[in-house]
Amino acid sequence: MSVSIQTNINSLIAQQNMRVNDNFQTQTIEQLTSGYRINNSGDDPAGLAVANKYRDDIAELNQGVLNANDGISQLQIIDGGMDNISEMLDRLKTLATQSASDTFSGDRSVPNAEFQGLLSEIDRQAQTIGMNTGGQFNTNLGVYIGGGRTDSGATSTANGTVSINLSASQVDTQALGLEGMQVVAGTQDISAGSPITSVQAILADTNNTTTAPNQTDFVFSGAGFSDGNAVNVAVNTQGVTDINTLVTAINDAITNAGNGTSAAATAFKNAGIVASVHTDASGGQELAFTSSTSAFQVQAGDMMANAFLGNFANPSFNADANSLASTAWGDNASNGAVGGAVVTFTGAGMTSPVSLTLNAGDTTVAATVADLNTQIAGNAALTAAGFSVSGSAGHSLIFSSSRGLYYYMGITGDTNNHLGFGAYTSGATGTAQGGALGVTTATTGHLYFSFGGGASNTNSLAVTTGAGDTIAEVVNEVNQAIATSANANIQAAQLQAQNVGGKLAIVSGNGTAFNITEDNGNGGSLGFGTVSADNNFTEVSTVNFHAIDSGGAASLTTTATGTVNPAQALSFTGLLGGTTQGITISANDSNGDMQSKTITLNASNASTVDQAVSQINTVLQETDNPTLQNIVAVKENVSGVEKINFLSSAQAFQVAVGSTTTGQGINGGTAANVSGSIATGTGSTISIDTQQGALDAVTAIENAVNKLGSAQSAVGRGENLLNYAQNLAQSQITNFSAAQSRIRDADIAAEAANLTQAQVLQQASIAAMAQANSAPQAILKLLQ
C-alpha cells in the first residue's frame, strides 16, 4: 500500500461510515419519536401504499359507523311513531265495535267525530315521522357504511351500502286502507231538498225505465270482476223513499251480489265497496261509492240507475235521466225468407262476438223480431248488455241496447237484404265469394270490409269499373284498388281479388276473417249485395254513456278523498292478420320488489277493444300474483271514443306498450310508457256514523293492523341490518388498524437497541476518524 499525503483514504472511509452511522441514528431517533416505522415513502414504498389503503378504509368505516348510528336513531324515531299509531288503531277498533252493535242506542255521530279525529291524527303523525305516502323516508333508503368489495377484491360502494326498503311501509290512513277510493255521482242534488231531482221524483218519473219492476241495476267492474264477469247489483226499490233509504237498499244489494259462489262475486265482495251519502259544500247530497282497498268502476244498468248517478237530461224541469238506449237500424225491412242468416253482436262489454242464426220459419219481419228476442233472452251475454229487437215490414229493423254501450252489429247471409242491413258475405275463413257480376255502366263504387267483428264503414275500398267489364277485368280493377289503398286494415289483411268459377272472390293472404258488402252506384254490380253506407255493419256509440269510477277517468267523476290518478287512457285499434303487440304491466309488491307480466295481444284475442280488455284482465288474474291481480283494464268513453285505461289501488304501477308496424293495437301501435299512482286525499272514506259503516270499519281496521305490522317489521329489519352492519364495520376497523400497525408502526424495543448501536458506532467513527486524521503527521518523520 502506498503512502500518500494528498489523499487520506482512511479518513475518507471513516467519514463515509460516519455518515452512514449518522443516518442510521437519525432514522432510529425519527422512528422512536414518531412511533412509526415508515415516516416517508423512502422508508418502505410498498408497505406505505398498503398502510395508506388501510388508513383510508379505517377513515371511511369510522364515518360509516356514525352513519349507521344515525340510521338506527332515525328508525327508532319511526318505530316509536308507529307504536303510537298502533295505539290509535286500538282506539279506532274500540269505537267501530261500539257503533257496530245493534244495541247501540246513542247518536253514532258522537263516536264518529272522535273516529275521524283519530284518522286525521294518524295522517299527521305519519307525515311527522316521514312515513306518509311519498314521505321523506317512504322509500328505499341506502345507508352507506363502507368496506364493500367485489368478488375480485375491488372497492364496491354498492356492496358497502345497507338497503333499508321502506317504500311499502307507509302508515298514513291511505296506505293502511282507512282512506281509499271514493267517487261521487255527479253534482246534482238528489236529496229531498231538491224536489225536481230528488230520489222521490226519480222513482215517480215513468220515463226512468228499469230492467224489472221495483228494481234498478248498477254494474260494477274491478280487479277480478270485470268485462264479461262484471257484477250486476240489482237494487230493490220497494221501501226506498229518500237518499238514505236508497243507500241502505244499494248496500243490501251489494252484500247479496257478493254472496255468490263465483270467483267474480268473491272478488267483488273482497273489494269492500260501500254506498254512502255525500254532502257537498253547498249542502246538496249525492250518491257516493267507496272502497278502502280496491279501484273500481260503476255504471248505470238502466235509466233509473242513471238518474241516481246524477245524469239528467234537463234537471231544471224534470227527473228524466239521460237516455242509455243506443240503436242500430236497417232500411226498409221486408217480409221474406231469412232462415240461416246470422246476426252478430260485437262489443257491449262482451269478451267475444255473439252470433244468432235465424230460424228457417222466419219469413216475415215480425217472425224474425220474435225469433231474435227469444234467442237474446236465452243468452246471458246479450241479456246483460240489454239487447232487444223491434221493427215491422216497410220500416226499419231496430236493434237496441238499454245499457247504452258501444257495439257493432251486422247480418250475414240475408242474400235478398230483407232486413235492410245489406247482403253481407262472411269471410270467416279468409275468403268471401260474391254472386254474379252485373257491371253494365262505368261507375265508381265501394266495397266495405268488417274485420274481427268491427265496423265496416271505416274500411272502404273504392273500385272503378267500366261498362261491360269481364270478370278478369274486374279482378284487375279490384286488385289495383287494393294495391293503392291507404287503409291499414285492408293492407294488413293482405287482401287479393280472384276469379273463382266466374265470380269475384276476395281472399285474405294471412287468413284474416272478414265480412264484406258493397255500396255501388249501379246496385251491387260486383255480386256482394248492397247497403246504405251509414249502416255497414253499424257501429253504435252511446250518446249519453256515463259511468263513475275510482280510477279518475277523463270523462268520469272523482273526489279529492282517495283519488286515484291512473295511467292515461289509451286509444285502441283492433289487431288484424299476423300483427302482435306486447304490453308489460308492472308494480311493486308489499316488500318493494317489482312484479311484472308481459301480455301478447294478437288478432285472435284483441281484434276488438272488448277482447283486448278481457285478454289483459284474464292474464293478470291467471298470474296468481296479488300485486298484479290488483290491476284491472277498463274501457272508457273519452269524447265519444272508446279507450283502454288501467285502474289499481296499488301505490304505483306502470304500463309499457310495445310498438307495431301496422299502426294497430293500443296507442295506435306506438310504443308508450304510462304510469298510475294514488294521490293522498284530504279526508277519509271510512266512517262509523252508520252501523254498516261501522261493521265495514271493523274489517278495515283489522286489515290496517296487519299492514301496520308489516311496516313495523320492515323498520325492525332495518334496525337489525344496521346493527349487524355496524358490528362488521367495527370489526373491520379493529382488524384494519392492526394490519396497518404491523406495517407502519415502529418496534420501540428494536429501535431502542438500534439507537444504542447507532450511538456506539457514531463514537467509534469519531475515534477512528481522529486516528485517520493523525496518520499524515506520521509521514513527516520520513522526511526528517
Image (cartoon, rainbow, N blue to C red):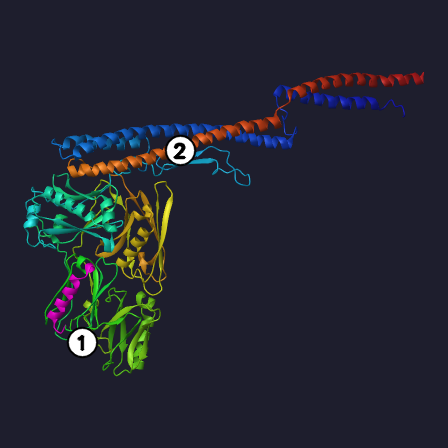
Residue drawn at x 22%, y 36% as measured from the top left:
698
Query: Mark 1 or 2, which is nearer the eye?
Result: 2
What kind of residue is marked 2? Gly
Relative image position of residue 721 (x, y in whole percent): 43, 33
- The answer to whether 323 is drawn above or below residue 588 in the figure is below
Say which amino acid is labelled 1.
Asn
Which quadrant of the figure contains the C terminus? Answer: top right
Q: Can residue 70 be seen from the camera position used here?
A: yes
Tell me, yes or no, whether the highlighted magenta stretch contains residue 268: no
657 sits left or right of 221 in the view: right
Q: State which quadrant residue 692 falls in.
A: top left
For the stretch drawn in magenta, what is the main secondary structure?
helix
| Count of marks placed on residues | 2
Of the image marks 1 and 2, the number of the one nearer the N terminus: 1
Residue 232 lies, with reference to residue 19, above or below; the image says below
Q: Quadrant of the N terminus?
A: top right
Query: How dense is the environment of label 1, judged by Cα within 10 Å: few (below 14), some, or many (20 and up)?
Result: some
Front-lying residue, 570 or 512:
512
| Residue behind mark 2 | 718
Helix, strand or loop for disc 2:
helix
The segment highlighted magenta reads: 362-381
Q: Which residue is mark 1?
A: 416
Q: Position of residue 317 (x, y in %)?
A: 6, 50
Q: Which mark is residue 258?
A: none
Q: Spatial distance from mark 1 to mark 2, Cα to Cα?
A: 77 Å
